[in-house]
Amino acid sequence: MKTNVLSIFVSMLLLTNIFCIFGCSSGGGGDTDNQSPTAAITSPANNSDYIYGEIVSFISTGTDAEDGDLPESAFVWSSNHDGIIQSGQKSFSTSSLSVGTHTVTLTVTNSAGATGTATRTIIVNSSSSGDIITNSLGMTFVKINPGTFMMGSPEDEPDRDSQEIRHQVTLTKGYYLQTTEVTQGQWKAVMGSKLSYSYFTSCGDNCPAEMVSWNDAQEFITAMNRQGEGTYRLPTEAEWEYAARAGTTTPFFFGNCLSTSQANYDGRYPLSGCPPGEYRGRTLPVGSFASNAWGLYDMHGNVEELCSDWYEYGSYSSSAVTDPTGPLIADGRVNRGGSWIDDAQICRSAHRSIVTPVSRYFYTGFRLARTL
């Protein structure tokens, strides 16, 4: 009996192998497409340059050996600076990208869940209609044209402060503003020695100068103006916010939330209703993140930035003003922009901080304005 059973089993096994000559499935059933789909970006060319807001479409294809041409729902576009920027379409416009150099990635997904990618590097330049100048020290300035904007924050902005009364401001004169914060290397080049009080000395020459008081900044500006390459100063508070907003009305230039891939701040404490991020616990080299639409870097975070105005509680008015310069005298000077140690609330475009003229903090620095 055992011999007959064994004979039957062997015969069945042989028949199975014969049938497999004509094709057997090695899997457990279902979709047999184990290959990744192919993504391709056909336009524009790599390293193309565009102006912020310019409408130039990216054209792409996505194909799969089993599915053929993939539907639009399979397409997702993302940027190393801006995250996911478009999904469900085979093309997108550069108007959705912030200023800076972007590695744009197209990801396509087939019905089996396998993915394929393609990339393009493009450069989105500032839409500021003015000039960009660089002095002999390598400091770059962008021209900020005159304009009118709403300064302060609306009453429904999350985590706003009572000192941010919203009012219309008109700036009748253009000015140049430094694209980055003054660096440790620039301080050393102008003053002849590195900052004696700097906390982050190991960060390098391209990191922002910090532990700088308002009076220290004035000494630096005096030394700059002796060089005969123009007239430098601190920006007014209104000039600073106008430039930081770059035409926006949201809490941050980047929108209603600020991520730690957009700025260096304490991401453990985001704005109300926004997702948390990382806390780096130090300054970073200037220009580590994408700029705003006017080509200005680190207007949110890294170091707080000194302004020329005195800070006086209740000094904001709800009525329209032109070319404001702040009160004649008060107890402290205005600090703007937030820093590496601050939560998102302090990094908002409208937030106002106060610092005495002699105080030095490891989160305070500055950027220069230059008279046209």
Image: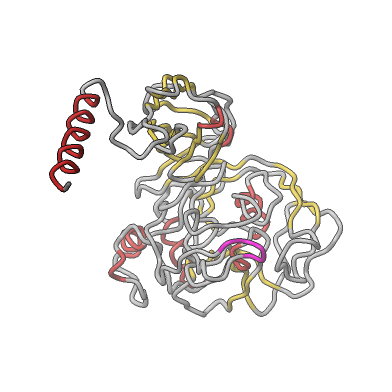
266 and 30: which is toward the camera: 30
Q: Which of the 4 quarters of the picture holds residue 167?
A: bottom right
**Residue 274 is a magenta residue:** yes
State the scheme by which the image is colored: secondary structure
State the predominant SS element of the stretch in magenta.
Answer: loop
Q: Nearer the viewer, residue 225 or 208?
A: 208
Give the x, y percent position of residue 117: 38, 33
Q: Residue furthest right?
A: 319
Q: Residue furthest left?
A: 3
Q: Position of residue 335 (x, y in %)?
A: 59, 68
Q: Where is residue 17 drawn, in percent x and y?
A: 19, 29
Asked whether residue 218 appears in the rendered view, the answer is no
Q: Nearer the viewer, residue 317 or 136?
A: 317
Q: Identify whether 163 is placed above or below 138.
A: below
Can you give x and y, in whole percent of width and height, for residue 159 in the image? 70, 68
Determine the residue positioned at 58% across, 76% down: 355
The residue sitting at 45% across, 69% down in the picture is: 279
The quadrant where residue 329 appears: bottom right
Where is the C terminus found, in terms of image quarters? top right
Residue found at the far front of this picture: 1
**Side of 311 where 125 appears, left or right:** left
- The residue shown at (66%, 50%) is 242
Q: How many dots with numbers? A: 0
Q: Which residues are magenta?
A: 271-275
Q: Is residue 136 left or right of residue 171?
A: left
Q: Is residue 19 magenta?
A: no
200 shown above or below 149: below
Asked whether residue 165 is in view, the answer is: yes
- Whether 349 is drawn above or below 194: the answer is above
- The answer to whether 135 appears left or right of 324 in the picture is left
